[in-house]
Image (cartoon, grey):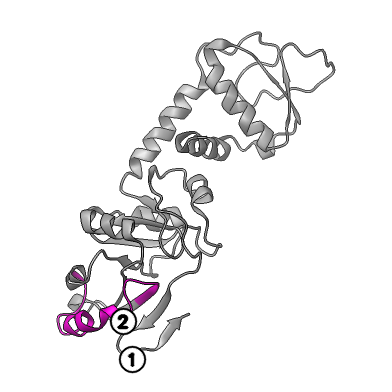
Amino acid sequence: MDVYFEQFVSFYLDKISIEKCKYKNLRIISSPEYKNEIEIIAYILKKRNINLYFEETEIKNLSYCDLLNFKKCSKSLQKQSFFTDLVQEFELTQQKYEQIFLTTTDTVVGIGTFVNNSNLELLYSIKNREKNKKIIILLGNIEQANSFVDQEVFPKLYYSADKYWPGNTTLLLKSKNNNGKIGLRIPKQDELIKLLNNKGPAYVTSANISGKQPLNIQDAIKVFWQVKNIYNFGEGSGIPSTIINFEDKSIIRK
């Protein structure tokens, strides 16, 4: 099953909330014109353990649900398919999130936005993350850190970074312009490093709703169905990065 289909199904489930349906039996009307739509309906309903009965069934006295926008006794789907509007809404939403991406890393699956074309507001929103919680930046090389780190701190970082990077350690450093601390990391994932060198550093946080457990890439694709830019470089450790305060080397998170 391709990613587009999986994400549309997730969008569809959010949209129609089948779990609220009082019926447990649905009649599916066969029609070659709507073959793809019918396959989607069948897939979704089976996921919700709803019994499916096609038009030719001999079973009687069933309660049919008209939640799917066609009449109980209709012999064919209405000419104006409700899927037309749904697909348009789905694709417009994905366009809105064009600057957001999902990626596997050497640690947990991440969701992020490239710094030079970022949309942090959407990233915070899609994760339901509090605005006062900063998001770390993944780098492709040590030189990229110079854009974010205090001028006096960067030389110290430059000559000691190989103790930590590439690897699963996030360093908290004094940021430029006296703007508090900033978390930086170079991942130990060759393909991801190539991406970061090509497109530039990226704000990346774990791909999960804030407060929930990190997701694997398959589940992240479904939960964040709005995001169509997906980089799958293989499975990571599944363990969040260690966070170390660079100034005093204290461990903030193991």
> Residue 146, image x and y in percent?
17, 73
Q: Residues within 10 Å of mark 1 (few under 14, many from 20)?
A: few
Quarter where residue 18 is shown:
top right
Quarter where residue 197 is shown:
bottom left
Could you tell me the amino acid type at mark 1?
Asp
Magenta highlight range: 147-170
Instruction: Report if residue 189 lies within the magenta region.
Output: no
> Residue 210, image x and y in percent?
50, 62
Which dot, 1 or 2, sits closer to the camera?
A: 2
Residue closest to the far bottom: 248
First in residue order: circle 1 vs circle 2 = 2
Circle number at residue 158: none
Q: Nearer the viewer, residue 182 or 249?
A: 249
Circle number at residue 248: 1
On the rendered structure, is 37 left or right of 178? right
Please name the residue shown 63% across and 13% down the image: 30
